[in-house]
Amino acid sequence: MKLLVITAAALVGLVTQVAKPTETVASRGDILVGPARATDGDSLRMGDKRIRLFGIDAPESAQTCMIEGEPWKCGRASRTALARLTRGRVLTCEVRDMDRKRFVSVCRIGGQDINARMVRNGWAVAYRRYSLDYLPDEWAARTAGLALWRSRFERPHDYRARRRAERRARPAPAPPPADCVIKGNISRSGEHIFHMPGQRDYHRTRINEDNGERWFCSAENARKAGWRIAKR
């Protein structure tokens, strides 16, 4: 078993740190220790490590649920719940598996299983495809009508499958006008950012016009529309 310590300095990108692990894979039972920030309701970033919480599934950041006929941004609410739970705390995460360079882990704060806490508080569901460990927590949250369970929602796994099917069925998008190659992207947090050709993240940025993203013909037009230039 390896103990991989992620220091607070590593988390904010500073060079002064106690240890900076270089492993990109881990074995079952390895331990990650350090502060972390929530990227969605079942995922964390600990230094340069991406962590997926084992055995649970939370709404995607763009996913909405319905409460009394009104849309509710349950994906963002779930991410906020995990952020509040972990902010300023040191996590101990036991690795169970690797998934696309993500450390699939059970994470604890002071011995308390936060995977279970997210499900028991109603912000995630048991991911039955991979584990039945958190079914009692899901049942408790459902019985109490907490968080997601006070709404009408699609299980995250089903939501992702439906969205993939819709994308496959959708005709290929038309290419942008020849002179309009600036990419207006909307981040998970809702920030409007444009990427210029030559910037580092330009080629890997994808534009989804159905989500309000768009192409611009000039940086001036992008700024007037409320977008800011990407930092890299």
Image: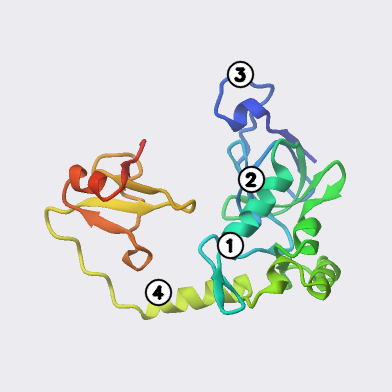
Circle 1 residue: 75
Mark 1 or 3, closer to the camera: 1
**SS class of the residue under badge 3?**
loop
Separation (CA) of disc 4 from disc 3:
44 Å
Numbered mark located on residue 53 in the image:
none
The nearer-to-camera label among 1 and 2 is: 1
Q: Earlier in the sequence, mark 1 or mark 4?
A: 1
User: Dot 3, crowdedness within 10 Å: few (<14), some or many (≥20)?
Assistant: few
| Mark 2 vs mark 3, CA separation in Å | 24 Å
In the displayed structure image, the side of residue 148 where residue 164 appears, left or right = left
Identify the residue position indicated by label 2 in the image.
25
Q: Residues within 10 Å of mark 1 (few under 14, many from 20)?
A: many
Quadrant in the picture for residue 75: bottom right
Residue picked out by circle 4: 167
What element does badge 1 sit on? Answer: helix
In this rendering, the label closer to the viewer, 2 or 4: 4
Q: In the figure, 78 relative to 6: above or below?
A: below
The picture places residue 105, in percent across and down from the top left corner, at 73, 52
- Front residue of 4/109: it is 109
Q: Tell me the residue that label 3 is attached to.
A: 16
Instruction: Inspect this view and state whether residue 129 appears.
Output: no
Q: Quadrant of the N terminus?
A: top right
Label 2 residue SS:
loop
Identify which residue is drawn at 25% across, 40% down.
198
- Work out how far the residue at label 1 is from the one at label 4, CA to CA, in angstroms: 20 Å
Distance between the Cα atoms at labels 1 and 3?
35 Å
Q: Secondary structure at mark 4?
A: helix
**Label 2 vs label 4: CA separation?**
31 Å
**Amino acid of disc 1:** Gly
